[in-house]
Image: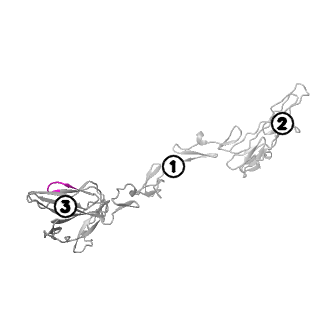
Amino acid sequence: MLGICVFLCAVFTHVLSQEAEEPVSYTCTEGYEYDRVREQCRDIDECTLLDDACKGGMQCINHFGGYLCLPKSAVIYISKEGEQVAQPDPGHAPLPVPPSQPQLPRVSSGTQRVPQPGRTVRCTPGFTADDQNLCRDIDECATGRHTCGPEQMCYNTRGSYTCQCPPGYQKNGEHCVDVNECEGQSPCQHHCYNLIGSFLCQCDQGYELAQDMVSCQDIDECSFSNYMCQYQCINSPGSYSCECPEGYQLQGNRLCQDINECETGTHTCRDDEMCWNYYGGFRCYPRDPCEAPYTKTSENRCICRSQAECQGLPSSIVYKYMSIQSDRTVPADIFQIQATNIYANTHNTFRIKAGNEAGEFFLRRFSNVSAMLVLTKPLSGPREHVVDLEMITHHLTMNYRSSSLLRLTIIAGPYAF
């Protein structure tokens, strides 16, 4: 609070010589200077003397013993008692200024005139005078001079105070009661739950609270894990869905199942072709794969009728088809070759005759009549592999040998499912 403080010029030092011709000296208080002509202490006008006495656009108001910096809006007026008063704004208590300069009594002949005491400032309610005779605001909240209830909070203001309820409460007479924030226009985007002194927001499934704790934002379930969907995860507001590639259909919520086009009739094979389904698609193969000098004897078996024409060739060729998933874990047993006819006094050996140039396969002999084809390297698809597996039969009693061939077509699908 701004105001004008009254300073009284006083006489402090009196040097009295025992001899009459010794000069008399005077001392003035701070803010005054001695006027030898009038023989009294004269006020120093700091507003004229100092160019930058006040800063920040404030106006300088001189008063006896000092000066005051007041806003431009401050009004100087004369009170009923003839005192000059500066009133900066309605919230400040007026402070009186002495109407005349204090006089410095002259000391002579060992006597001294004592100046009259200064006026005591009268402050408006809510303010009190300090030791400098300035009106200061009373903090009723700190001093306990308020009437707020035990559940209320006291806030000091200039010249007074106010009682308010804590956040989440409102005044009901002299008491504070809980505010039901969920009534009327709810602050929550989705669901609001009232609490004592507060509230809680919750979101629908598939959403989560944003940083403001009232808004709801979509949860991107697809970002949680690569295992949300077997093939592709599609996020949507509040949810997600799984999609499968062409040739597959969704099984359950996340798995992809191969579509058997050969069974559903959605293939494009001709009547003279056989439809063979594999993971992710289908292939069309001739119903009669036999070529001269071989003749078809069953659905997938070709034999050579003429010994002369088939000299040096397998006596029979069997066609087989299989499909595997791409990038299958290795090593893996994928196909077993078995002799259809078993003769006494014979010995059978097995080998991969063709189709293993990259070394993806290995043929492991089980017994005299069977062997297992082992996958040694992962196969990436979609790709077709044709492997010729040969069984050589040695006739021990008649001392001759014959062979038969199994032509295995392996189709690796485009995906690992």
Report the residue marked by disc 1.
167
Rendered location of residue 73, percent (x, y): 72, 52
As drawn, 393 above or below 110: below
Farthest residue to the top: give it: 18
Q: Residue at x 18, y 56 (%)?
A: 371
Kindly tell me whether residue 83 is visible in this rendering. Answer: no
- Given this view, does label 2 or label 3 mark the residue nearer the observer? 3
Q: Is residue 369 magenta?
A: yes
Q: Amino acid at mark 3?
A: Glu
Report the residue marked by disc 2.
104
Q: Earlier in the sequence, mark 3 or mark 1?
A: 1
Q: Residue at x 8, y 60 (%)?
A: 398
Rendered location of residue 8, percent (x, y): 78, 38
- Given this view, does label 3 or label 1 mark the residue nearer the observer? 3
Q: Amino acid at mark 1?
A: Pro
Disc 1 to disc 2, C-alpha distance? 61 Å
Q: Residue at x 14, y 57 (%)?
A: 348
Q: Quadrant of residue 238?
A: bottom left
Q: Secondary structure at mark 1?
A: loop
In screen coordinates, is 234 left or right of 281?
right
Q: Which residues are magenta?
A: 363-370
Q: Secondary structure at mark 3?
A: strand
